[in-house]
Amino acid sequence: MDQVKAMKVFVRIYERSSFTLAAADLNLPRATLTHTLNQFEAWLGTRLLERSTRRVRPTLDGEAYYQRCVQLLAELEEAELAFREVAPKGLLRVDLHGTLAKYFVIPALPQFMARYPQIELSLSESDRFVDLIAEGVDCVLRAGTLGDSALIGRRVANLRQVTCASPDYLRRFGEPERLADLSRHRAVNYVSRTTAKLFPFEFMVAGQRQEVAIDGALSVFGAEVYKASAVAGLGIIQCPHYGVAQQMAQGLLQEILVETPPPPMPVSVLYPHNRHMSPRVRVFVDWLAQVFAQAD
């Protein structure tokens, strides 16, 4: 019995809670996974997973053994790379924030794939909470301040943000010169898809973060609708500079309150806290940091 292969099979079935999904991930027949796991459990002398027609769940021994397997497999992969001088390889599943992917990750991706030709990438796009273990994802790229999570985050960027409005809006309402002037203005409110709450308008004043309430009759979900609403003269918005740089260059939007800009937007890569960062994830995260280091 190939013990390392058996450990990989067990880990994947555990994480996916499904023989069928694990088989697809590993590109192996489902029957092979069943046979391998049965052999492995017989060799260990304990049952790792309880199986039924509806679900797969770990036993107490399976829970404990999973933690050891994840650590051992990561250490084995690192040792192989160190002593054999082998480049990182294998499948890397990444869930990306769509706008960040469009502007930064995808345009630079040919460089990563040329540098690491043995890494196979599987990319998905969302801005929601992702259960990395259950969904078989290795890491996610997210923007914004991180809340409480069972994930480990590495910040790869702090993106400049701007407050802006259309020239037509500013002709009608006047350009605010200080934060107190915002009481006479209208906002386009951005609603979080994950919390359904409005994002506050924030400004840096003498090095301190300050929230300002701005009245607004329009609330939106989605970055493209948000920007389009501002271009249409419906109110003031705050967003990362990269997202409106083209509209500002075309004169469709104008930056305001330059002396009190919004705080920068953090960008982070997240991965499960109970995993050692695999070499595949590590080189991808390092590469992302390089990509965002060149960003505005």
Image: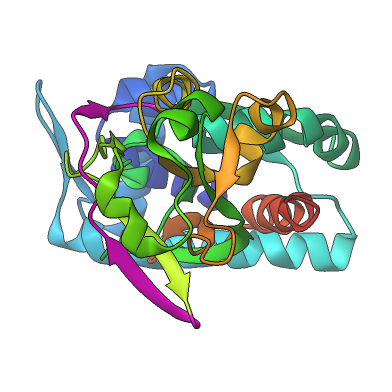
Picture quadrant where residue 274 is located: bottom left
Horizontal side, residue 131 vs residue 4: left or right: left
Is 210 inside the magenta-drawn segment? yes
User: Eyeballing the image, is 265 above or below 193?
Assistant: below
Horizontal side, residue 82 vs residue 234: left or right: right
Horizontal side, residue 137 vs residue 183: left or right: right
The residue at the point 14 percent across, 54 percent down is 59
Comparing 54 with 32, the one in front is 54
Picture quadrant where residue 222 is located: top left
User: Eyeballing the image, is 126 above or below 143?
Assistant: above
Q: Position of residue 69 (x, y in %)?
A: 43, 61
The residue at the point 26 percent across, 40 percent down is 192
Comparing 79 with 280, the one in front is 280
The residue at the point 71 percent across, 58 percent down is 289
User: Eyeballing the image, is 72 above or below 227?
Assistant: below
Range shown magenta: 206-222
Is 100 inside the magenta-drawn segment? no
Residue 138 in view here: no
The residue at the point 20 percent across, 51 percent down is 47
Horizontal side, residue 105 vs residue 172: left or right: right
User: Eyeballing the image, is 279 above or below 75?
Assistant: above
Q: Position of residue 209 (x, y in %)?
A: 39, 74
